Amino acid sequence: MSTFPSELRYTHDHEWLRAQGATWRVGITQFAVDQLGDITLVDLPNVGDLITKGQRFGTIESVKSVSDLYAPVSGRVIAVNATLKDGPEQVNTDPYNNGWMIEIEAADKSELAELMAVDAYTKHVAAQ
Amino acid sequence: MKRTPLWDAHKQLGAKLIDFGGWDMPVSYPAGTIKEHKAVREAVGLFDVSHMGEAYLRGPEAKAIVGKLTTNAVESAPPGKAVYTLLCTPSGGVVDDCIFYKRSDTEFFVIVNASNRAKDLEWFRDHASSGCNVEDVSDQTALIAVQGPKAVAMVDFLSGGTVAGMPSFTFRDAEVAGVPVIAARTGYTGEDGFELACASGDAPKLWAALLQAATPLGGLPIGLGARDSLRLESKLPLYGNDLDDDHTPLEANLGWAVKLDKGDFIGRQAMLAQKASGLPRVLVGFTIDADQRQIARHGYAVIDPAAPGAPVGIVTSGGPGICVGGAIGLAYVPPRLAEPGTKLSIDCRGKPAPATVVAGKFYKRGKA
């Protein structure tokens, strides 16, 4: 069983968020990566796009399957990891750093309070 | 869930196991599907395919019964020959695709798809006679595939130099690492190699010896994920995806394995009629155009870009071309859209992806 970084916040859909000043960087957890297998393509929104909590903002293709990425909070996309276009395997090798996906400026700060801390997320994974 | 005799070995290797038709099978090992796929193309890979079904058809009428059940010229093959064939229904739909191994006119061995084992055995028994006994030996038989450019020399070494001279699609009794096997020069990857059938109890010993020999050659154990991506790159059909009882072998582009002039067999009349009236649809290979960022998958609709509207076909298999690049797939389309170079549009979850029909295999192995 993986252990998860304690400084991050998590969603039930196995995404992590890291506070970067006033914005939040988003990626997927090691648990999600283990479920997906080798990732071959990550389709992300454009900088400036508005995304809505719980709605699809992108897709991940692995060798075997395609999965949706759901917005963890509502807000504006202020950065996208363009290196994933030619290097999607970074999500497999380094999901919490080089494998990050987008940065969001949250529209409604109260949504951030609904994210899980590491203990709650670890329990969520254990129950899967 | 059912386990193969190599389940403990997979666990020890750190495999990720999934439920595959009721079997707890490795989908990948820690190297991951992409590295496993490349190891088979560049070195050698070991596959536990013990979940597949094996049976013998024996008796004075075995030749006649096998002739009726199969579309290819299985019954008239020389002893020692392995023959890929379809089993068809009277309407020409595919019951299964499988390989028959002819020992003599009175003894045939057959390996069938795991998911179809019960159905196939019932099909054999329904059509057998008192002169042809059907024996299911699946539970006491393990099957290990050894595939890749280094596979033949490696297995030959472990067999004391007794198998390298075997032509493609032949089999013989041999000993590999001291284990009695049926060694067949066959596979499901597009690479050279062997499929080795042995007694279940001997499988761990054979697997360990093969793994020990393969590792210094850059070889890896290979999960079902890479098995699927390898067969797709080599345009080998998968039953349940590309083949089923709604499509005939002629539609599936397997006419080469249907010998309409060999004498009567189940499905022959339907296929003769279909040949006369024209095929309603045909299985083609396609690539998603290079500038696109989509992968077509099983079940996605095919649209005719020259006449957009209702779907005209369906994707049966699709995925990334791990060694050939891009995204590749197979689809049933009307014959007017089957010519190589024809433009298609695939509905990738609401986004149209331009694609092009391509001839032949996506991946072709170089001559050794």
Image: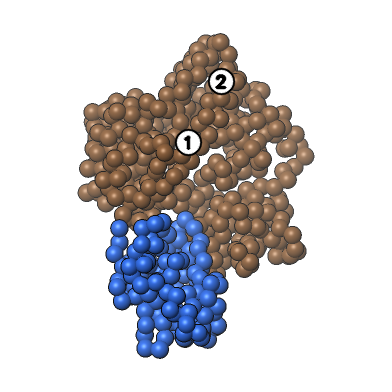
Dividing the picture into quarters, in which one does residue B49 lie?
A: top left
Same subunit, labels 2 and 1: the answer reads yes
* Type of the residue with mark 1: Ala
In this view of the protein, can residue B152 be seen by the observer? no
Rendered residue at 56%/20% (across/down): B125
Q: Nearer the viewer, residue A79 or A21?
A: A21
Q: Secondary structure at mark 2?
A: helix
Dividing the picture into quarters, in which one does residue A63 lie?
A: bottom left
Q: What chain does mark 2 sit on?
A: B
Rendered residue at 65%/30% (across/down): B89
The crowding category of the residue bearing disc 1, from other C-alpha atoms within 10 Å (few below 14, some 14 to 19, many at least 20), is some
**What residue is pinned by disc 2?**
B125
Rendered residue at 26%/43% (across/down): B211
In this view of the protein, can residue A69 be seen by the observer? yes
* Type of the residue with mark 2: Arg
Chain with colour brown in the figure: B
What colour is chain A? blue
| In this view, A46 is above or below B69 | below
Q: Nearer the viewer, residue B122 or B24?
A: B24
Q: Which one is earlier in the sequence, the residue at label 2 or at label 1?
A: 1
**Is the N terminus of chain B in the top left, top right, bottom left or bottom right quadrant?**
top left
Rendered residue at 51%/66% (across/down): A68
The crowding category of the residue bearing disc 2, from other C-alpha atoms within 10 Å (few below 14, some 14 to 19, many at least 20), is some
